[in-house]
Amino acid sequence: MALSVDAGFDTFFTRLVPLASQREAAAKHRASVETSLSQAFGVHLFREIGSSFGHGTGVRGYCDVDLLVSIKGPRPNSSDTALGWVKSALQSSFPYTEVVVRRPTVVVKFKQGTETWEVLPGFITTRGDQKTPVYDIPGAASGWMDTAPTAHLAYVNEINKLDHVAGGAKKLARLAKAWKYYNNVPVSSFYLEMRAAQYVSTLSSFVPVWDMCGLLEYLHKIQLAAMNDPRGAAGRFSAYSTPANGVIALSKLSTGAVRARKALDAHKNNDPATAFYYLDLLFGGRFPAR
């Protein structure tokens, strides 16, 4: 029997979950990454942030591990300096592994990029507290910005636990990231996750084919505008790192929103074959076959 659109999304969600082997490999590398940085400079703590394996929004085969390293001592004037410290330490420890600066992080591409670590240098500030620490981190293009990772994770978890959306915040974030990865959209995964949670917070229920369309159309309407911290713990954060990336991201977003709308319209018109066709286009040929 051919899949319905809802069943297609159920299958798709199963395929998006990272494999246990990926989680195990990442855990092994974490110790060596932390040792490398601890030996290079003083560290208060390491904190996994963003779409790490344990958070429930990563995408199989694309689940970068986001690691904030809280560096001891005064913050340098230039964020380039902090990124240089991290890059130098990791290059010394992993000479045969590609290590590059990709603001606001230093990216370590283990196994030819199939396992990617994004290391974010941070400096604890006095603007937060023990429960909700605020860090200065490199800005998307230059300078410094602030972030409150525990507050951000708590926000997504809070929305995700609402009874009427049944885990929809993380499911929609995972769909948005799959769209990003499968179409090479240069937009921040963190931004997509926070926008997805914010969008789901306005819903009375979560239906993937409806709400993926709604999210992309909303992002297109606001033109990927920078987002205020929903908890008010830190400042605004951007969707992309450079104006050039913004142009590319908006172009691909426009295409994605049109495809999502055509899929939804076909679904509403009881035309699952057409809906599957456009969903497959939307997700770069990765959506389950009917």
Image: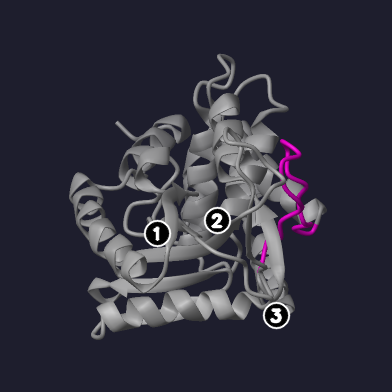
The residue shown at (67%, 61%) is: 253
Residue farthest front in this picture: 73
Spot occupied by residue 137 in the image (x, y as percentages of width and height): 61, 62
Residue 140 falls in image quadrant? bottom right
The residue shown at (52%, 56%) is: 179
Counting residues from the N terminus, which is met first, the one under dot 1 or under dot 3?
1
* Residue type, label 2: Ser
State if disc 1 and disc 2 touch (CB < 8 Å).
Answer: yes
Q: In whole angstroms, how far apart are the C-alphas of marks 2 and 1?
A: 10 Å
For the residue labelled by badge 1, is the local secondary structure a helix, a strand or a loop?
Answer: loop
Residue 27 is left or right of residue 118, and the answer is left
Question: Does residue 21 sit above or below 202 in this rendering?
Answer: below
Question: Does residue 220 sit above or below 155 in this rendering?
Answer: below
Q: Residues within 10 Å of mark 2 (few under 14, many from 20)?
A: many
Residue 63 falls in image quadrant? bottom left
Is residue 225 within the magenta segment? Answer: yes
The residue shown at (26%, 85%) is: 95
For the residue labelled by badge 2, is the local secondary structure a helix, a strand or a loop?
Answer: helix
Q: Which residue is mark 2?
A: 189
Q: What segment is highlighted magenta in the picture?
A: 223-240
Question: Can residue 270 be seen at all in this image of the molecule?
Answer: no
* Type of colouring: one colour
In the image, 97 versus 82, the foreground residue is 82
Please identify the quadrant where the C terminus is shown: top left
Q: Which mark is residue 260?
A: none
Q: In whole angstroms, how far apart are the C-alphas of marks 3 and 2?
A: 17 Å
Residue 60 is left or right of residue 48, and the answer is left
Q: Which residue is mark 3?
A: 244
Q: In whole angstroms, how far apart are the C-alphas of marks 1 and 3?
A: 23 Å
Q: Nearer the viewer, mark 1 or mark 3?
A: 1
Q: Which residue is mark 1?
A: 64
Majority SS type along the magenta span? loop
